[in-house]
Image: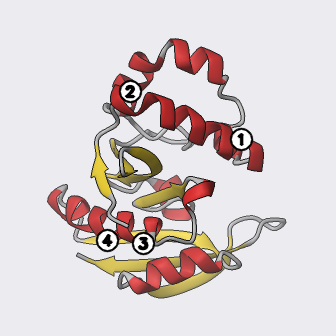
């Protein structure tokens, strides 16, 4: 299965909206507040915002973020985000690279391929060593990160009631 990374584009509106419904059906926290009808009506603005994105979930100053969509046979299959630098929040949660694979495309190597293709992009942004975090029980992400050269440096709690978090570094 060949996957390409592209900048967010209006061209993928139908499959992106289908993916959003899949993510919401499984309860992906960061998409639960998105109204699919409103998004469909304002998709061009959404795409423009994605192409000039800043991190929006950190307490301190947002940082530039390159958002790329994984496309398979003309269909939206997932996304990968490359944060251009780390602020204090990203050092604890999030790191330089984050990704989501559309549920109906999982188990097909999509995330691993997106991740591998994103590393040269991160390097071109001036990142020489990338931090990637994942929960200690997220075995799929652990495999993806390690397959792509991730070196586990630390495992710790982010919060007293939170899950153990793994901190991987990849030299670019």
**Tags 2 and 1 touching, CB below 8 Å:** no
Examine the image and state in which quarter residue 157 appears.
Answer: bottom right
Give how far across and how far down residue 41 sits, in percent.
53, 12
Give how far across and how far down residue 66 sits, in percent.
32, 45
**Tags 3 and 4 touching, CB below 8 Å:** yes
Q: Earlier in the sequence, mark 1 or mark 3?
A: 1
**Tags 4 and 2 touching, CB below 8 Å:** no
The one of 55 and 143 positioned closer to us in this rendering: 143
Q: Which mark is drawn over residue 105?
A: none
Q: Earlier in the sequence, mark 4 or mark 1?
A: 1
Q: Residue at x 33, y 60 (%)?
A: 3
**Tags 4 and 1 touching, CB below 8 Å:** no
Q: Residue at x 56, y 53 (%)?
A: 102
- What residue is disc 3 on? 112
SS class, disc 2: helix
In 3D space, how far apart are the residues under numbered discs 3 and 4 (Cα atoms)?
A: 6 Å
Residue 127 vertical placement versus 23 (above, below)? below
- What residue is disc 4 on? 116
Q: Earlier in the sequence, mark 4 or mark 2?
A: 2
Q: Which mark is drawn over residue 24?
A: 1
């Amino acid at each position: 299965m060949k996957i390409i990374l592209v900048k967010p584009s209006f061209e993928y509106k139908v499959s992106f909206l289908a993916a959003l419904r899949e993510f919401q059906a499984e309860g992906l926290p960061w998409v639960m507040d998105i109204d699919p009808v409103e998004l469909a009506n304002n998709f061009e603005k959404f795409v423009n915002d994605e192409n000039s994105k800043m991190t929006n979930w950190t307490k301190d100053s947002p940082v530039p973020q390159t958002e790329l969509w994984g496309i398979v046979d003309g269909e939206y299959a997932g996304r990968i985000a490359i944060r251009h630098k780390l602020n204090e929040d990203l050092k604890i949660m999030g790191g330089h690279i984050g990704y989501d694979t559309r549920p109906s495309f999982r188990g097909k190597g999509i995330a691993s391929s997106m991740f591998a293709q994103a590393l040269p992009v991160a390097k071109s942004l001036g990142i020489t060593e990338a931090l990637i975090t994942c929960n200690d029980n997220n075995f799929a992400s652990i495999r993806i990160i390690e397959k792509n050269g991730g070196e586990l440096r630390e495992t710790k709690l982010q919060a007293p009631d939170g899950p153990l978090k793994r901190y991987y570094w990849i030299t670019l």
